[in-house]
């Protein structure tokens, strides 16, 4: 399974520990265990964005920057199903 996400300013993640759900996977595409991955910020802030794929199918992204929102970001991750 490969999941990709991208925002060119249309999806804003709140600052420091702001989390949004970007979707829910169908049952046959869900991982057996929770997965944590890194997203790339398209800004020069240098702060980390985390992607979480839960065994429940929820896919979320968290902004760890304490000062600004994240509007420009992207990620891609793969795992076996």
Image (spheres, grey):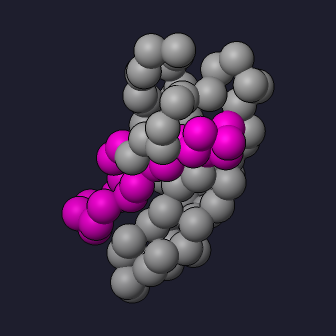
Can see residue 73? no
Choose between 29 and 72: the one closer to the eye. 29
Residue drawn at x 55%, y 35% is 5
- The answer to whether residue 64 is left or right of residue 6 is left
Residue drawn at x 39%, y 58% is 49
* Percent x, y of residue 14: 57, 74
* Percent x, y of residue 31: 54, 29
* Residue 30 sits in quarter: top right
* Percent x, y of residue 78: 42, 21
Residue drawn at x 36%, y 43% is 37
Residue drawn at x 43%, y 29% is 76
Determine if the magenta segment contains residue 76.
no
* Percent x, y of residue 65: 36, 75
Depicted 45 relative to depicted 16: above or below: above
Please give the count of numbered marks on the rendered protein. Answer: 0
Determine if the magenta segment contains residue 52.
yes
Depicted 47 relative to depicted 23: above or below: below
Choose between 7 and 59: the one closer to the eye. 59
Furthest toward the bottom, the residue is: 67
Depicted 47 relative to depicted 57: above or below: below
Can see residue 45? yes
Magenta stretch? 37-59
- The answer to whether residue 55 is left or right of residue 46 is right
């Amino acid at each position: 399974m490969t999941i990709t996400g991208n925002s060119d300013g249309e999806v804003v993640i709140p600052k420091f520990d702001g989390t949004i759900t970007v979707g829910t996977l169908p049952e046959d595409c869900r991982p057996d265990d929770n997965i944590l991955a890194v997203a790339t910020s398209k800004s020069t802030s240098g702060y980390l964005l985390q992607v979480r794929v839960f065994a429940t199918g929820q896919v979320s992204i968290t902004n760890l920057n304490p000062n600004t929102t994240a509007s420009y970001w992207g990620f891609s991750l793969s795992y076996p199903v």
